[in-house]
Amino acid sequence: MSKKIILAIESSCDETSAAIVVNGREVLSNVIASQIDIHTKFGGVVPEVASRQHIEAINAVVTEALSEAKVTLDDIDAVGVTYGPGLVGALLVGLQYAKGLAYSLGVPLVGVNHIEGHICANFIEHKDLKPPFVCLVVSGGHTFIVHMKDYGDFEILGETRDDAAGEAFDKVARAIGLGYPGGPKIDKISKEGNENAMKFPKANFHDDTLDFSFSGVKSAVLNYLNKMNMSGEDINKADVAASFQKAVVEVLTDNVIETCKRRKVDKIAIAGGVASNSALRKSLMEAGDKLGIDVLFPSMILCTDNAAMIGSAAYYELIRGNIASLDLNAKPNLRL
Ligand code: KG4
Ligand code: ZN
């Protein structure tokens, strides 16, 4: 297939992003307008505020993505856009904008699943990577173990039964007074703490599931903090953070490695915001080394929400003929 230049748009949560991606692997631009400073005041993402910010930002973000990539709208072969999962009002801003562009340019519209986008971030980073591999998708809203058997062929083998991994990081960070977003703050402060100071429980399902549960460890941390506060004892934030992080990282590592064994796969790719976590990186690398399993991570900027990953996923959908019609709607609970 000839060269395909895709303009991709992502607006599922609190980042307005546009990118120009060639053939799913080469990123010419990846512009990200983060709303984090606005939402920090509220201690988390406020959906209505997010939608309004997307509306204000989107035109400038797309214009900048085009100019940074040194392309014009006439060069665009298709428009890729996230249509779920995510916040419905936020998704609709990117989706309606993308529809308008695709219609006016007379090019195909490609709807992209945000989770598939996170997985495809690895294709940008690792130019030779091809399926099959196991992907751990860990973000603020999602925790999935996915077996990517081929392009567009995914099987979810494990998922969270309650909080997402990133959500647990954010809630624990708030409880120990580190602020939002909590993941990077827990990661940082944990380096000064003792990860064996407290033993927080890991979910133990009595079946052979690869699912996760993070509400138990979160509650255990909250109970510990309450107990210490009531007895007036000092809380060592770094020890709490490191011990919590250890419990989460261990279960993520165990389940991903077990998936590789069951599926006889020797490649793991990580995706989503929590993939930036330094303890998770270290733990998976060490486990992979022992078993001869390759562990791949996208760079930090491709781990968190961005449109380049959507452009990569859109390319693989486009070449399989998955073109959306202009009545495509946002799907807040879209599954892989
Ligand atoms: O993928 P992402 O940008 O947005 C979603 O689609 O959710 O992920 C954001 C999540 C937040 O919960 C944030 O706290 C977490 O990723 N996160 C981290 C780290 N960096 C971001 N969690 C743990 N350690 C980190 N270094
Ligand atoms: Zn995401």
Image: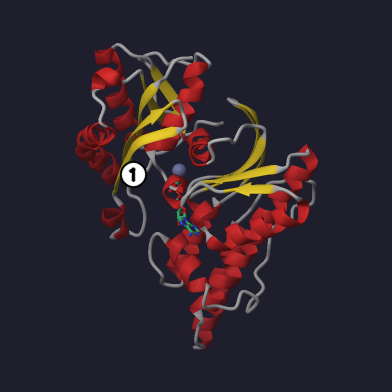
Q: Which residue corresponds to the image point at 33% horizontal and 44% vertical from the top-left? A: 15
| Image x and y of residue 300, in percent | 45, 52
| Image x and y of residue 246, in percent | 62, 66
Left or right relative to 70: residue 131? right
Q: Is residue 100 visible?
A: no
| Image x and y of residue 329, in percent | 39, 23
Q: Nearer the viewer, residue 161 or 108?
A: 108
Task: Give the color scheme: rainbow, by chain, secondary structure or one colour.
Answer: secondary structure
Of the 4 image quadrants, the one containing the C terminus is top right
Q: Which residue corresponds to the image point at 52% horizontal and 73% vertical from the top-left? A: 191
Q: Nearer the viewer, residue 215 or 312?
A: 312
Q: Nearer the viewer, residue 188 or 71?
A: 71
Looking at the image, residue 232 lies above or below residue 278: below
Please name the amino acid that badge 1 sits on. Glu
Quadrant in the picture for residue 74: top left
Quadrant in the picture for residue 48: top left
Instruction: Determine the quadrant in which ligand 2 lies.
Output: top left
Left or right relative to 263: residue 248? left
| Badge 1 element | strand
| Image x and y of residue 311, in percent | 42, 30
